[in-house]
Image (tube, grey):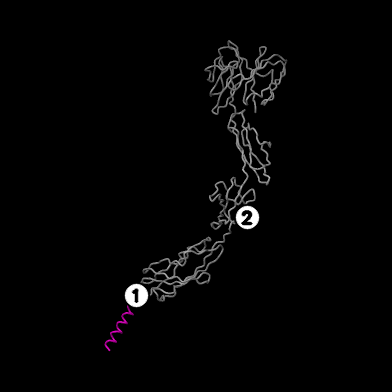
Amino acid sequence: MKKQLLLSSVCFLFLFIQNAHAQPADAEVATFASPSNLNFCPAQLPISINIYNNDLVDITEVVLNWSINSVAQSPVTWSGLIAAGDISAIELTPSYDFLSGTTYDIEVSISTVNTLPDPNSANDVNMVSFQVYEVFIPIFYWNGCALECLNASDYLSIQWYRNGSPDPNAPNTGIYTPAQAGNYTMTGLTYDSCDAVADTTIFANPPTHGITPLGVTAFCEGDSVGLVFTASEQVFYTWNTGSSDDTIYASMDGWYSIDGLTVNSCPIIDSIHVTVHPTPVVSISDMNDTLVSTYSGLHQWYLDGNAIGGAHDSTYVPTGSGIYYCTVTDVFGCTGTSNSINWIFPGISIPVTMSDVMLYPNPAKDIVNVKFNSGKEKLELNIFDAVGRLVLKQIIFEDTAIDISGLKGGVYQCVFNGEGKVSSQKLVKTF
């Protein structure tokens, strides 16, 4: 009898200790840890639930049942430690593919806590509805001229990629005409701030084209530069000057552009800017037997077409009779030529004019005509370049055509001498 009582006491103590260790705590199914927002963009995300220990007993094990849109998922058994008053996130699945435009009802319930039923079933269940924004996959194609997204209106902006990297030259619009060949894809940013990534890559090989200058594009008035248009395929085009030649010569300041179409009717537009620095304007006058220039920069004075050594100031005192003028050079290296003065010792100056002869056309390219406005006479024509060098000399008896095709483009000084008369005029030679 004593043995039976002793055995019963031991069994009762064992059960008491066992029940004490297996005592359940009040586990509460709290908020979702992931997804953390009720509305979000399509993505692969983990699903996690926050479990709160609402009791004084540590939670060491929890079994969770859960479902998605009423479809039961595999139960999750978690073991660890959630102390009294603490909260811990328990992962139900490491990754779930949340699809565009879909609503997900996720329900989670506690099966057991510390291997026993939770004593408070009122907080053992939680169900939340998640709404995934509807995102349309970009659809684009290469039409032979440009890349075009067919559903561009679905996006707030668009990013084009070339060979896997963002194309810095691309606009954030649905149509892009690339300048380089490559593998192109795109991403659209939706109005819900979701990235919609295209699942295709398209190789685009646009025609190459461009304008190439044959020299510097910034120069002095009277000069010019050749502009050559080239393309990788046949192009029908015109310059904004009206020319349809491959090469044009630009002598005016401004933009020179090409507007045309390829054989596939792809628009071609190219442009280049040419800067023409104006010729410095200078005039001289005789003030008390001193020749005074209106220009303040670098000077070179001339007597009868010959440079006067050391004469670089804005004033010059003549030392003998003859035709005086000066050239000036600005910061761009452009040279201007003044009017001429026929200074006769001891101090008589006669302005040199063109009252008796005329040059035309001016500017001229190959031929310039000399026309006598009054009676014909024998004249000596001397043409000086911008730095005062004599480049052409000819005796004239009547209206004459002068061949200047051998001269370089620029500004020249033409001086006529004859029968006590002297006249001078600038001539612009074009290319």
Disc 1 secondary structure class: helix
**Label 2: how many residues lie within 10 Å, few (<14), some (14-19) or many (20+)?**
few
Spot occupied by residue 71 in the image (x, y as percentages of width and height): 52, 71
* For residue 207, side relative to residue 24 (left or right): right
**Prevailing secondary structure of the magenta residues:** helix
Q: Earlier in the sequence, mark 1 or mark 2?
A: 1
Q: Quick one: 166 or 359, which is closer to the camera? A: 166
Which quadrant would residue 6 be assigned to in this image?
bottom left
> Is residue 16 within the magenta segment?
yes
Residue at position x 57%, y 59% from top? Answer: 135
Q: Is residue 53 above or below residue 212?
A: below
Spot occupied by residue 387 in the image (x, y as percentages of width and height): 58, 21
Extreme-top residue of the structure: 346
> Is residue 284 within the magenta segment?
no
**Label 1: how many residues lie within 10 Å, few (<14), some (14-19) or many (20+)?**
few
Separation of marks 1 and 2 at Cα, in angstroms: 66 Å
Q: Quick one: 118 or 342, which is closer to the camera? A: 118
Mark 1: amino acid: His
Q: Which residue is mark 2?
A: 150
Disc 2 secondary structure class: loop
Quadrant of the frame with the N terminus: bottom left
Extreme-left residue of the structure: 2
Q: Which residue is mark 1?
A: 21
The range drawn in magenta is 1-20
